[in-house]
Image (cartoon, helix red, strand yellow):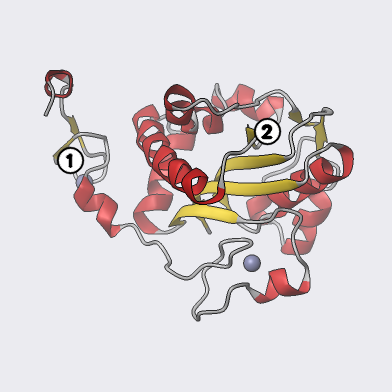
Amino acid sequence: MGIYQRLIPKQSCVLCSEQSDYCVCTQCESSFSTSEHRCLSCATKLNSDLQFCGECLSHSPYFSKTYALYDYAEYCSQLIKQFKFDHQLCVGDYFAHRLFDLYTKIVRESGEYDAIIPLPLSTQRIKDRGYNQTHELLRVIKNKTNATIDTNCAERIKATQALSSLSLEQRKNEIKNAFSVKPVTYKRVLLVDDVMTTGSSMNEISKTMLKNTDIETCDVMVVARA
Ligand SMILES: [Zn+2]
Ligand SMILES: [Zn+2]
């Protein structure tokens, strides 16, 4: 252990209060559920060795691949709520380190992206929260890699109501034309968000990008897949 590391005061785990390097201890982390079998396209849990879920087979999404760290369940969903709604930035820092690990693995296996693009929030939502949480999640990737993180090219132009209370069909309608994307020269981008539920937002922004810009491939990276 280096001097620098020893000088960092230990924190207590926000879940179990044990001393820990991050505000989530390795013990609690090991209890997060993460599915071994996921749809290659949307990362939804699959119970068998199939490569794609029925939904993606019948309506192929505009994005190509989705990478998820965890299932949106139990402790993990509790942590994401603490981060988003109680402003627990140490939780964001913890997830930012895990996303950095995932990102380096993706790049090692599939190559660099021209840009990483966080899913934009509406200006009202940023005002309510005080910050865009996805930017916090990208902090470690920003500091440790040369990746281009573009927070300006995409904008949410339609304030949507919380999608969580809507049916799949209602979500699709609500999110339609919600994004605008400036002309960019990227070919291959990685879209990032904290949680992917149905994937309606990711699908809509990917559609907008593929139709209106030079972008040819949109992949998705999220902390948790519901
Ligand atoms: Zn713990
Ligand atoms: Zn799928």
- Most extreme residue toward the bottom, as rendered? 48
Query: In the rendered view, would you say 36 is above or below 154?
Result: below
Q: Which mark is residue 50?
A: none
> Residue 182 versus residue 12: which sits nearer the camera?
182
Pick the quarter of the image with the N terminus. Answer: top left
Q: Is mark 1 within 8 Å of ligand 1?
A: yes
Give the SS element for disc 1: loop
Q: Amino acid at mark 2?
A: Pro
Q: Residue at x 46, y 26 (%)?
A: 139
Number of the front mark, 1 or 2: 2
In this rendering, is residue 160 above or below 45?
A: above
> How far, Cα to Cα, is label 1 from label 2?
34 Å
| Camera-nearest residue between 169 and 139 | 139
Q: Residue beneath label 1, please?
A: 17
SS state under label 2: loop
Which one is earlier in the sequence, the residue at label 1 or at label 2?
A: 1
Residue 120: assigned label = 2
Task: Estimate how packed mark 2 is, as few (under 14), some (14 to 19) or many (20 or more) residues with alpha carbons within 10 Å.
Answer: many
The amino acid at mark 1 is Ser
Using the rendered view, name the quadrant where residue 154 is placed. Answer: top right
In this rendering, the count of numbered labels is 2
**Camera-side residue of 107 and 41:** 107
Pick whichever, 172 or 106, lies toward us: 106
87 displayed left or right of 123: left
Q: Is residue 93 above or below residue 209?
A: above
Which residue is depicted at the point 26% across and 39% down? Answer: 14
- Image location of residue 124, percent across then percent down: 69, 26
